[in-house]
Image (tube, rainbow, N blue to C red):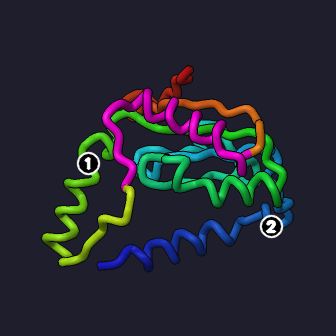
Amino acid sequence: MSVAREFEAANAKYAASFTKGNLPLPPARKVAVVACMDARLDPARALGLEEGDAHVIRNAGGRVTDAIRSLVISQQLLGTREIVILHHTDCGMLTFTDDVIRDKIRSELKQNADHIAFLPFKDLRQSVLDDIEILKQNPLILDVPITGYLYEVETGKIVRVE
């Protein structure tokens, strides 16, 4: 059974007391957060964000390569001037390689995904450092503060990666 009906009921309650319809389009704190899509990570709660504070861009692993388009729009059209990268412990991206997922797709879906870089990693801390460097070297990304963190799914704490 789909969860869509549950979402619709939850949204009806949310909308009934909604008071933030007049927030400006640009994020108030001028920050873009690139975070993993893992369901155990709630970037707004972990970082103390409210609606309207930040752009939160999520994808598998929180990889910046997948977020470049969104970051350019965030900076160029909506004025963000800081970037935060948020990876996390016990990440699924540590559990496979491109070859493993490509073989699975070939076997189960009878499709070829060789053209897709799934961006897994073997070292969590290094993945954050690599993503920081990717952004610093990208000519489409402004020279702004970039901070990397590891979110500990076990404790809820963030740990700065330098």
Name the residue furthest left: 107
29 vs 118, nearest the viewer = 118
Q: Amino acid at mark 1?
A: Thr
Mark 1 falls on what kind of element? loop
- Residue 143 picture location, percent across and down: 77, 37
**Whole-percent x, y for residue 42 in the image:** 52, 46
Instruction: Give yes or no for residue 62 being in the magenta stretch.
Output: no
Report the residue at 38% width, 33% height from top: 89
Quarter in which the N terminus is drawn = bottom left
Choose the circle earlier in sequence order: 1 or 2: 2
Task: Name, please, the residue furthest toward the top.
Answer: 162
Q: Amino acid at mark 2?
A: Gly
The image position of residue 67, as x and y in percent, is 58, 54
- Are dots 1 and 2 in contact, CB under 8 Å? no
Answer with left or right where residue 15 lies relative to residue 150. Answer: right
Q: Residue at x 78, y 52 (%)?
A: 75
Q: Residue at x 65, y 45 (%)?
A: 138
Q: Which mark is residue 112?
A: none
Quickly name the residue at label 2: 21
Q: Quadrant of the C terminus?
A: top right
Whole-angstrom CA distance, mark 1 to mark 2, is 43 Å
| Residue count near mark 2 (Cα–Cα under 10 Å), binned few <14, some 14–19, many ≥20 | few
Tell me the number on the disc at residue 97. Answer: 1
